[in-house]
Image (cartoon, rainbow, N blue to C red):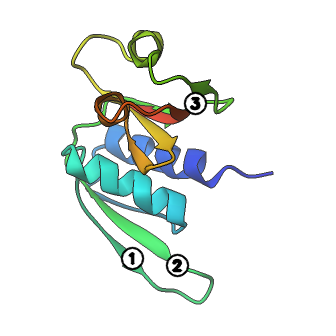
Protein backbone atom coordinates (compact mmCIF):
# COMPACT_ATOMS: atom_id res chain seq x y z
CA UNK A 1 0.00 0.00 0.00
CA UNK A 2 1.12 3.52 -0.68
CA UNK A 3 0.78 6.54 1.55
CA UNK A 4 0.39 9.50 -0.81
CA UNK A 5 0.62 12.05 2.01
CA UNK A 6 3.93 10.55 3.20
CA UNK A 7 5.26 10.61 -0.37
CA UNK A 8 4.20 14.25 -0.81
CA UNK A 9 5.77 15.44 2.46
CA UNK A 10 8.96 13.48 1.73
CA UNK A 11 9.18 15.10 -1.71
CA UNK A 12 8.70 18.56 -0.20
CA UNK A 13 11.31 17.89 2.49
CA UNK A 14 13.95 16.58 0.07
CA UNK A 15 13.43 19.50 -2.32
CA UNK A 16 13.79 21.91 0.62
CA UNK A 17 17.02 20.18 1.73
CA UNK A 18 18.70 20.63 -1.66
CA UNK A 19 17.43 24.19 -2.04
CA UNK A 20 15.05 23.75 -4.95
CA UNK A 21 12.21 26.23 -5.17
CA UNK A 22 9.56 24.14 -6.96
CA UNK A 23 8.40 20.53 -6.67
CA UNK A 24 5.41 18.51 -7.81
CA UNK A 25 3.35 16.09 -5.73
CA UNK A 26 0.38 13.88 -6.55
CA UNK A 27 -3.00 15.58 -6.23
CA UNK A 28 -5.48 14.20 -3.72
CA UNK A 29 -8.05 15.96 -1.54
CA UNK A 30 -6.07 15.24 1.63
CA UNK A 31 -2.80 16.53 0.16
CA UNK A 32 -4.61 19.64 -1.07
CA UNK A 33 -5.94 20.36 2.42
CA UNK A 34 -2.51 19.80 4.01
CA UNK A 35 -0.92 22.15 1.46
CA UNK A 36 -3.61 24.74 2.28
CA UNK A 37 -2.70 24.58 5.97
CA UNK A 38 1.02 24.82 5.18
CA UNK A 39 0.42 27.88 2.99
CA UNK A 40 -1.75 29.56 5.64
CA UNK A 41 1.15 29.25 8.09
CA UNK A 42 3.76 30.48 5.55
CA UNK A 43 5.62 27.18 5.15
CA UNK A 44 4.91 27.34 1.39
CA UNK A 45 4.85 30.28 -0.99
CA UNK A 46 2.07 28.91 -3.18
CA UNK A 47 0.65 25.76 -4.75
CA UNK A 48 -1.56 25.13 -7.75
CA UNK A 49 -3.26 22.17 -9.37
CA UNK A 50 -1.78 21.11 -12.70
CA UNK A 51 -3.82 18.65 -14.74
CA UNK A 52 -2.12 15.78 -16.52
CA UNK A 53 -3.46 12.64 -18.14
CA UNK A 54 -3.41 10.56 -14.93
CA UNK A 55 -5.31 12.57 -12.32
CA UNK A 56 -3.31 15.65 -11.50
CA UNK A 57 -0.34 17.12 -9.71
CA UNK A 58 0.18 20.01 -7.35
CA UNK A 59 3.01 22.33 -8.27
CA UNK A 60 4.38 23.57 -4.94
CA UNK A 61 6.58 26.67 -4.61
CA UNK A 62 8.89 26.45 -1.60
CA UNK A 63 10.63 29.24 0.28
CA UNK A 64 13.07 27.32 2.50
CA UNK A 65 11.15 27.49 5.79
CA UNK A 66 10.64 23.76 6.34
CA UNK A 67 13.35 22.07 8.39
CA UNK A 68 11.52 18.81 8.98
CA UNK A 69 8.14 17.39 8.08
CA UNK A 70 6.52 13.99 7.93
CA UNK A 71 3.43 11.93 8.60
CA UNK A 72 2.52 10.51 11.97
CA UNK A 73 1.91 6.77 11.87
CA UNK A 74 -0.26 5.29 13.14
CA UNK A 75 -2.78 8.10 12.81
CA UNK A 76 -3.71 8.07 16.47
CA UNK A 77 -6.79 9.74 17.91
CA UNK A 78 -6.35 12.67 20.31
CA UNK A 79 -8.90 13.97 22.81
CA UNK A 80 -9.70 17.65 22.86
CA UNK A 81 -7.84 18.03 26.17
CA UNK A 82 -4.62 16.24 25.09
CA UNK A 83 -3.29 18.57 22.37
CA UNK A 84 -0.49 20.02 24.52
CA UNK A 85 0.89 16.56 25.37
CA UNK A 86 0.93 15.48 21.72
CA UNK A 87 2.58 18.74 20.71
CA UNK A 88 5.39 18.06 23.20
CA UNK A 89 5.77 14.57 21.76
CA UNK A 90 6.16 15.57 18.09
CA UNK A 91 7.32 19.23 18.02
CA UNK A 92 10.83 20.22 19.24
CA UNK A 93 9.81 23.31 21.23
CA UNK A 94 6.93 25.53 22.29
CA UNK A 95 5.83 27.82 19.47
CA UNK A 96 7.97 25.99 16.90
CA UNK A 97 6.15 24.10 14.18
CA UNK A 98 2.68 22.63 14.12
CA UNK A 99 0.72 19.42 14.01
CA UNK A 100 -1.75 18.89 11.17
CA UNK A 101 -4.84 17.02 12.30
CA UNK A 102 -8.07 15.69 10.87
CA UNK A 103 -11.13 16.72 12.88
CA UNK A 104 -14.89 16.60 12.35
CA UNK A 105 -14.54 20.26 11.28
CA UNK A 106 -11.94 19.47 8.60
CA UNK A 107 -8.14 19.51 8.32
CA UNK A 108 -6.53 22.07 10.66
CA UNK A 109 -3.64 22.64 13.03
CA UNK A 110 -3.56 21.40 16.59
CA UNK A 111 -3.81 25.01 17.84
CA UNK A 112 -7.01 25.57 15.85
CA UNK A 113 -8.43 22.27 17.11
CA UNK A 114 -7.59 23.27 20.69
CA UNK A 115 -9.30 26.66 20.22
CA UNK A 116 -12.35 24.97 18.70
CA UNK A 117 -12.34 22.39 21.51
CA UNK A 118 -12.47 19.40 19.17
CA UNK A 119 -10.51 16.17 19.08
CA UNK A 120 -9.18 14.48 16.00
CA UNK A 121 -6.55 12.25 14.44
CA UNK A 122 -2.92 13.22 13.97
CA UNK A 123 -1.85 13.36 10.32
CA UNK A 124 1.50 15.15 10.07
CA UNK A 125 4.00 17.50 11.69
CA UNK A 126 6.09 20.34 10.31
CA UNK A 127 8.71 22.70 11.74
Give whichever of discs 2 and 3 has the lower sequence position: 2
Based on the displayed image, in which of its 4 quarters is residue 98 positioned?
top left
- Element marked by disc 3: loop
Q: Nearer the viewer, mark 2 or mark 3?
A: 3
Q: Position of residue 96 (x, y in %)?
A: 24, 20
The residue indicated by pointer 3 is 72
Secondary structure of the residue carrying tag 2 is loop
Label 1 packing within 10 angstroms: few (<14), some (14-19), many (20+): some
Query: In the image, is 102 to the left or to the right of 66?
Result: right
Is there any visible trace of residue 24 in the rendered image? yes
For mark 3, does the 10 Å Cα neighbourhood hold few (<14), some (14 to 19), or many (20 or more) residues?
A: some
Query: Residue drawn 41% across and 41% down?
Result: 13
Q: Residue at x 30, y 47 (%)?
A: 38
User: Alpha-carbon distance for marks 3 and 1?
Assistant: 25 Å
State left or right for residue 22 relative to residue 24.
left
Q: On the image, numbered disc 1 is attached to which residue?
A: 49
52 on left or right of 92: right
Image coords of residue 75 (percent x, y)? 64, 33
The percent coordinates of residue 109 (x first, y second) are 35, 37
| 24 to 91, vertically: above or below | below
Measure the alpha-carbon separation of dots 2 and 1: 7 Å
Q: Secondary structure at mark 1?
A: strand
CB under 8 Å between callouts 2 and 1?
Answer: yes
Between 72 and 105, which is closer to the camera in this rendering? 105
**Marker disc for residue 56:** 2
* Label 2 vs 1, first from the N-terminus: 1
Amino acid sequence: MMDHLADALNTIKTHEMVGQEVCTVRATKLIGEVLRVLKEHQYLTEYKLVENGRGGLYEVKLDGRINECGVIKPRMPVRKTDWARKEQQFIPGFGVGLLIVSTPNGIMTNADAEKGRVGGRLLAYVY
